[in-house]
Amino acid sequence: MEILLYFLLFISSILVIKFLVPKRYKNLPPGPPSLPLIGHLHLFKKPLHRTLAKLSDKYGHVLYLQFGARPVLVVSSPSAVEDCLAKNDIIFANRPHLLMGKILGHDYTTLLWAPYGPNWRNLRKISSIELLSANRLQSYSDIRHAEVKSMVQRLSGQGCDYRTVEMKTMIFELTLNVMMTMIAGKRYFGGQVEELEQAKRFQEIVQVTLSISGASNIGDFLPILSWIGVKGIEKKVWNLKEKRDKFLQELIEEHRISRSGGMQTKEKNATLIDVLLSLQQTEPEYYTDEMILGIIWVLLAAGTDTSAVTMEWAMSLLLNNPQVIKKAQAEIDNNLEQGRLINESDVNKLPYLHSIINETLRLYPAGPLLVPHESSEECIVGGYNVPSGTMLLVNVWAIQQDPNIWVEPTKFKPERFDGFEGTRDGFKLMPFGSGRRGCPGEGLAMRVVGLALGALIQCFDWERVGEEMVDMSEGPGLTLPKVHPLKAKSGTDTSADTMEWAMALLLNNPQVLKKAQVEIDVKLKQGVLMDESDVNKLPYLQSIISETLRMYPPGPVLIPHESSEECIVAGHTVPRGTTLLVNLWAIQNDPNLWVDPRKFIPERVDGLEGTRDGFKLMPFGSGRRGCPGEGLAMRVVGLTLGALIQCFDWERVGEEMVDTSEGPGLTLHKLQPLEAKCRPRSVALKFISQF
Ligand code: HEM
C-alpha cells in the first residue's frame, strides 16, 4: 500500500511539474530556492505574515514563491501594493480557487469568493447600496446601541469591585448579536434570547466555523493529495456547509412566511433578510434563496470575527498602556454630558478614541495578508513580470510595522494619528484593503468598534489580571487572533472560588446536578426565582456546598496560628511561639476518615446541619479564630449556586471532564478558569426574561 502511494506521488509530481507549474517566465521576482513538488511549502510557518515578512527582508519586497503547484506573489512595500491594487487593480481583482471558496462560497459565487465579473459587480453593488449603505447602517444604530448597553449592564451587574472578565467571549457575543439582529432580527447570546434551540444550533455553527478558519488546507496547494484521496479538512467543511445552509434556509423561510402572512415589515424595521426578500420579489431569477443565503453568510463571516478581534487587541493594548485609557476617559468625560452612555454620533467627536482604533488596526490588522487575490493576466509589479494565475498576498502587517515608514513601529502610540482622519494613509496604512476588493464593511466595523470600545472606556476602570503585561502573542488563523484570550480585571474572593469548584464538580457529575434541580423544582414555588430564605429548605443543595468545601476548602491550610504558651498536642510538648498550620485539606481528604475521599458524593453529608462535622470537616476553621464570615458566605454561595442550578441546564464545553487541577496561592483556586455551556431551563424562562 505504501509503495503504491509513493508511486502515485511520483507519477503525480511529474504530471504537476509538466502541466501545472507555469512555463518558465523571464524576469520573475526573486525568491528563495525551492524544493521539487512542494516548492516553498516547507517555509510555511505560522503566523504566516511574520514568516513572509522575514523572507521579504531577505529577498525583497516583491517576492515570488511557489506554494506547491500554486505560484504566489508577496508584496510588502507601499509602491509594490500600489502596482497591484491601483495600477493593476482589475487584473488582481480576482480570488484564487481555494477549498473554502468552493464549498462555503457556493462554488465561488459569493461576494467574498466570486471572480471579478458581472456577478461579483452586482453582489458588490447590492451590498454597498442596499445592505451596508450609510442610510441602512443609520437605520440600525438603535440595535447597536441596545447591544452595547446590554453589555455594559451585564458588566455593571457584577458590582463595584474589580472582577475578572472573559473579554474575548463578551466581545465576540456582542458582535454576533449585532450582526444577527441586523440580518435576521434575532439575538443568540446573553439575556433575552428567545429561541433557545435555534440559538444553540447557531452557536455550534459559529464554533465549528472558528475552529476551521485557522486551518490550512494542504490540498489547495498540492491538488494531487486530493486526487489520491487525502481529504484533510474537506469533510469537516462539507458538514459545516450542510448545517449552515439548513440553518440559514430556515431563517429565510421564517421571514418569507411572516411576510406572506401580511406582516410586511416597515422599511425602518426591515432586517437584511427582508430587504433581500423584497428584491427577490422583483427579480426572482437572480435573487434566489441560495444567493441570499450566500450574502448573509459572507456578511456574518467577514463582519463578526474581524471586528471582535480588533476590539480584543485594542483592549489588550489599553491594559498594557493604562495612561492611554486615562487620556481616552478624559476625552470622553470632557466631550459628553455626564451620566449619559456614549452613542455612535459621539464617536466622531472623539479623535483620540479614533486614533486608538487606527493604532490598533496598524499593529494588529484583522487581515494581516488581506484576503488572497489572483492575477487574471500577466502584468508588471515592481519592474518584474508576474504570470497570470498568480496568487497575491499583500503583507499589510509588514508594511504597517516597517521601521522605514513608521517611527518606533512596534510601540502603541495613538498620538501618531493626531489630526489624522479616516483609516487609510496611502498604501502605508490600509487595514481594510484597497481598490475594487477593498472591504465594503468598513463603515459598519468602525461604528461597532468605536461605540463598543468607547462604552467600555467610558463606563469602567480597567486593570490587568496580574502584575504581568497582557500576552500579545498572535495565533494562527485568518483574522490575526490573540493566542491567549483576553481576560481583564474588573476582585477575587473565597466565595467565588467555592462556587467555581462547585460548578466544576457539578459539570463532572451531571446526575448530582439533576438531583439538585429536582429538589428545587419540587420544594420551591414554580415560576419564581429562589431567594435566600429558600436555601434552608434545600438540604441537598447544602450537601453539595458542604461536599465542595470538603474537597476544595478555600483555605486548605488555615491561616497560621501561634502558641502563646507551651502546651501538649497529641502527647507531644509544643513550645511557646510555635506557628501552627492546620492542614485542613489533608484531614478532609483523609481516606481513614472518608470513604473514597476524592469522589464527589454530596449524599455523604446527608443530615449534617451546618458546615461542620467535629474536627474532620471544618472548612471555616474552628474555635475563637474561626471564620466570622461563614453566615454571609453560605448565603451568597447558597443563593447564587441555587439560582444557577434552578435557571439553567449546564454542560461541559467538550467531551472531556472539567480539569480540576489546583492553582498555586493561599486560597485553593482552580488552575484553569472554568468554562461551561448553559442554556436557560424552560421552567425558568418566564422569570429569566424579566431580568
Ligand atoms: C475591523 C473590522 C474589519 C476589518 C479590519 C476588515 C478588513 C477586510 C480586509 C483586509 C478585506 C480584504 C480586502 C482585500 O482583499 O483587498 C476585507 C474584505 C471584505 N470584508 Fe471586511 N473587515 C472588517 C469588517 C467587515 C464587516 C463588518 C463586514 C460586513 C458586514 C465586512 C465585509 C467584507 C467583505 C464582504 C469582504 C470581501 C469583499 C470582496 O471580496 O469583494 N468586513 N475586509
Image: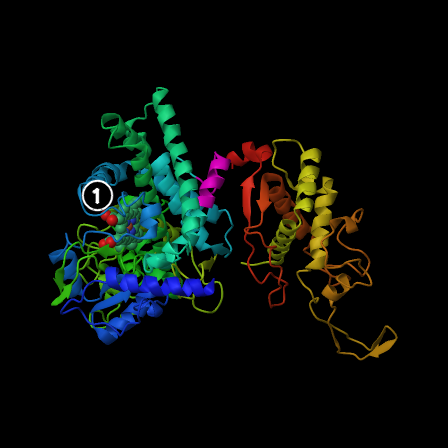
> Residue 421: where, in percent of width, then height?
19, 55
Residue interval drawn in magenta = 188-205
Count of numbered badges drawn on the protein: 1
380 above or below 303? below
In magenta segment, residue 656 = no
Among all residues in the image, which is located at the extreme right? 571
Corner quadrant of residue 567: bottom right
Q: Is mark 1 on a helix, strand or loop?
A: helix
524 above or below 10? above
Colour mapping used in the image: rainbow
Corner quadrant of residue 362: bottom left
Task: Examine the rendering and report whether any part of residue 411 can be seen.
Answer: no
286 above or below 588? above
> Residue 138: where, in percent of width, then height?
26, 38
From the viewer's perspective, is 550 left or right of 500? right
Could you tell me which residue is drawn at 54 percent across and 41 percent down? 679
Question: What residue type is disc 1 on?
Answer: Trp
From the viewer's perspective, is 138 left or right of 534? left
From the viewer's perspective, is 188 left or right of 428? right
Give whichever of 167, 281 is nearer the camera. 281
Which residue carries the number 1 mark? 120
> Residue 294: where, in percent of width, then height?
31, 40
Task: Examine the rendering and report whether any part of residue 45 can be seen.
Answer: yes
> Residue 680: where, in percent of width, then height?
55, 39
In magenta segment, residue 194 = yes
Give whichever of 324, 679 is nearer the camera. 679
From the viewer's perspective, is 569 left or right of 150? right
Could you tell me which residue is drawn at 37 percent across and 63 percent down? 9
Could you tell me which residue is drawn at 71 percent across and 66 percent down? 558
Among all residues in the image, which is located at the extreme top? 262
Q: How would you rate the neighbour count of disc 1 (Cα within 10 Å): few for under 14, some for 14-19, many for 20 or more?
A: many
Mark 1 residue CB less than 8 A from any atom of ligand 1: yes
